[in-house]
Image (tube, grey):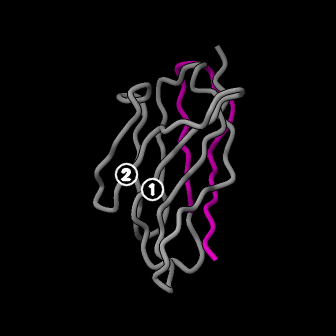
Amino acid sequence: QVQLVESGGGLVQAGGSLRLSCAASGSIFSINIMGWYRQAPGKQREFVARITSGGSTYYAGSVKGRFTISRDNAKNTGYLQMNSLKPEDTAVYYCNADIFDTRFTKNDYWGQGTQVTVSS
């Protein structure tokens, strides 16, 4: 079994910062792409950022220059550093990862989500 657990969400004022973490655990052989998505109330889930196993990063235009995605492969953990937060960044943030387990089966996993609220 593989599990993703996010942490680090909370309430912050506009202009502030938060750092989200996503820890993968279980029967993991390797993690390919790790990513972050978010879903605001009444809206569809949207892509935020992703990072490959080699460290290449991609960002949604709305967060580029403010958010930084990173990962620690030794710890099977991904991070999302969010700076200059805006009220429109308020959403539940979900971690996503493309993982090969120890039986070499590849699956797409999601965390349970962590709430980020930015007050104006």
Q: Residues within 10 Å of mark 1 (few under 14, many from 20)?
A: many
- Residue assigned mark 2: 51
Image height of 38 relative to 94, above or below: above
Residue ID at (32%, 46%): 57
The kind of residue on which mark 2 rests is: Ile
How far apart marks 2 and 1 lie (CA) works out to: 5 Å
Closer to the chain start, of discs 2 and 1, is: 1
Q: Is residue 25 above or below residue 18?
A: below
Residue at 37% across, 30% down:
64
Is the C-beta separation of discs 2 and 1 under 8 Å?
A: yes
Q: Which mark is residue 34?
A: 1
Q: Nearer the viewer, residue 93 or 18?
A: 93
Relative depth, front residue between 16 and 1: 1
Residue 107 at x, y percent in the picture:
52, 68
Counting from the top left corner in percent of width and height, residue 70 is at 39, 50
Quadrant assignment, res 33? bottom left
Q: Is residue 14 magenta?
A: yes
- Amino acid type shown at disc 1: Met
Placement of the C terminus among the 4 image quadrants: top right
Q: Residues within 10 Å of mark 2 (few under 14, many from 20)?
A: many
Secondary structure under badge 2?
A: strand
Query: Magenta region, mostly helix, strand or loop?
Result: strand
- Label total for image: 2
Residue under the point 53% across and 62% down: 108
Per the rendered image, the range of residues in magenta is 1-23
- x and y percentages locating residue 76 in the rendered image: 48, 67
